[in-house]
């Protein structure tokens, strides 16, 4: 345990003092502040006397100046931060020759990989929690509407899910860091997979769904729903889709299950206002997505752990 904590504190200090982390943090803070500022300016146009969860709307409202919401920016920047924290966790130590010197000390090998992953996870958690608290405080000051107890709990759940989402990308980067000898290769592999899953997976899912169940403007609601079901099933291969659906349920309680989006749209068109789901039911809905993210994170970390424990490390 002492060896694990020594690696943990050393890596944690390195993360917070690195220029790479400082630049990424400032970028995320500026993006988050900008989106909340635009949301606070436009939130009054979409609020009526019957509107519920007004404080949560700060995190989902976008504007003409910045046509993206706060969760979209997090889904874009959290993978970058996770990759930046993990892509050189092992191979940089191996290339510099520090790894053999570290393991020559009275230190268990698993303490190295566990300490590095734990330090990255804590760094990521502090970053995500601080930016959410910052934008929530700004929004509270700008709109003057305090959050309810349920809204606070939903924000805590949102922070937890965001940390798990970032932990997956960090564990994936650590996995590539163990398997590839060069830091540039592990970084490019992590970024390439992120771009594929974030940008192209939805296109592939749409093409497959359109080939299996073709639809047009005259298609019935049943065919459109079947096409949407196939599209969502395939697109859930991407962790970005799992994270997006989870955030939607947490921050937009009136939408409920993402699989029923078409039904809800028809209800809005007919003048009906869906009843917001309580927090307990929202957590039950997102449970499959959340467990999938946790399982993917555990698989990536287990792969890097097993490979690192079996790796032959020679002194240089």
Image (cartoon, grey):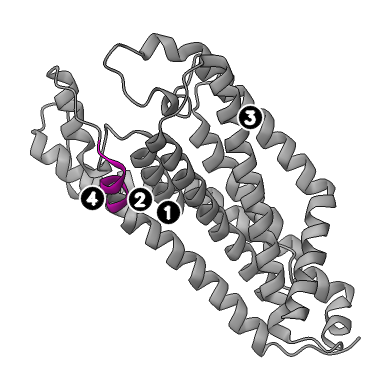
Q: Are marks 1 and 3 in contact (CB under 8 Å)?
A: no
Circle 4 residue: 230
Residue picked out by circle 2: 235
Q: Which residues are magenta?
A: 277-284
Classify 39 as above or below 199.
Answer: above
Asked if residue 283 is among those painted magenta in the image, a careful observer would answer: yes
The answer, for residue 198, to whether it is visible in the render is yes
First along the sequence among labels 4 and 3: 3
Q: Is residue 155 above or below residue 49?
A: below
For label 2, count other residues whose C-alpha is less than 10 Å away and answer few (under 14), some (14-19) or many (20+): many
Q: Nearer the viewer, residue 232 or 13?
A: 13
What's the distance in space between the residues labelled 2 and 3, CA to CA? 26 Å
- Residue 250 badge: none
Distance from disc 4 to disc 2, alpha carbons, whole Å, reads 9 Å
Q: Secondary structure at mark 4?
A: helix
Where 35 sits versus 176, above or below? above
Q: Position of residue 134 (x, y in %)?
A: 63, 32
Asked if the residues shown at circle 2 and circle 3 are in contact, with their CB atoms under 8 angstroms apart, the answer is no
Left or right: 259, with 42 as reference point = left
Residue 267, image x, y percentages: 15, 25
Residue found 36% across the figure and 27% down from its top: 53
According to the image, label 3 marks what residue?
31
Residue 219, magenta (yes or no) = no
**Magenta stretch: dominant secondary structure:** helix
Which is more N-terminal, label 3 or label 2? 3
Q: Is residue 41 above or below residue 254?
A: above
- Callout 2 touching callout 1 (CB < 8 Å): yes
Residue 188: in sight, yes or no?
Answer: no
Q: Which residue is mark 1?
A: 238
Question: Picture coordinates of residue 4 (x, y %)?
Answer: 73, 76
Cα–Cα span, label 1 and label 3? 24 Å
């Amino acid at each position: 345990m002492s060896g694990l904590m020594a690696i943990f504190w050393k890596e944690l200090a390195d993360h917070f003092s690195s220029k790479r982390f400082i630049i990424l943090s400032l970028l995320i803070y500026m993006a988050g502040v900008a989106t909340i500022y635009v949301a606070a300016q436009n939130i009054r146009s979409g609020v009526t006397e019957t509107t519920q969860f007004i404080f949560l709307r700060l995190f989902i409202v976008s504007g003409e100046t910045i046509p993206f919401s706060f969760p979209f920016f997090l889904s874009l920047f959290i993978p970058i931060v996770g990759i930046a924290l993990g892509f050189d966790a092992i191979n940089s130590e191996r290339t510099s020759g520090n790894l053999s010197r570290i393991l020559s000390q009275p230190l268990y090998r698993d303490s190295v990989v566990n300490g590095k992953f734990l330090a990255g996870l804590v760094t990521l958690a502090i970053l995500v929690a601080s930016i959410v608290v910052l934008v929530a405080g700004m929004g509270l000051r700008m709109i003057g509407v305090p959050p309810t107890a349920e809204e606070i709990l939903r924000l805590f759940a949102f922070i937890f899910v965001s940390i798990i989402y970032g932990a997956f990308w960090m564990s994936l980067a650590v996995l590539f860091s163990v398997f590839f000898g060069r830091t540039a290769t592990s970084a490019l592999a992590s970024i390439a997979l992120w771009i594929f899953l974030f940008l192209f997976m939805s296109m592939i899912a749409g093409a497959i769904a359109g080939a299996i169940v073709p639809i047009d403007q005259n298609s019935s609601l049943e065919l459109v729903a079947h096409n949407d079901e196939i599209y969502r099933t395939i697109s859930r291969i991407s962790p970005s889709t799992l994270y997006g659906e989870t955030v939607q349920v947490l921050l937009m309680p009136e939408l409920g299950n993402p699989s029923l989006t078409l039904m809800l749209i028809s209800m809005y068109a007919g003048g009906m206002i869906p009843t917001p789901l309580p927090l307990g039911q929202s957590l039950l809905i997102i449970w499959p997505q959340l467990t999938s993210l946790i399982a993917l994170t555990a698989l990536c970390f287990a792969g890097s752990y097993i490979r690192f424990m079996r790796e032959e490390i020679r002194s240089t």
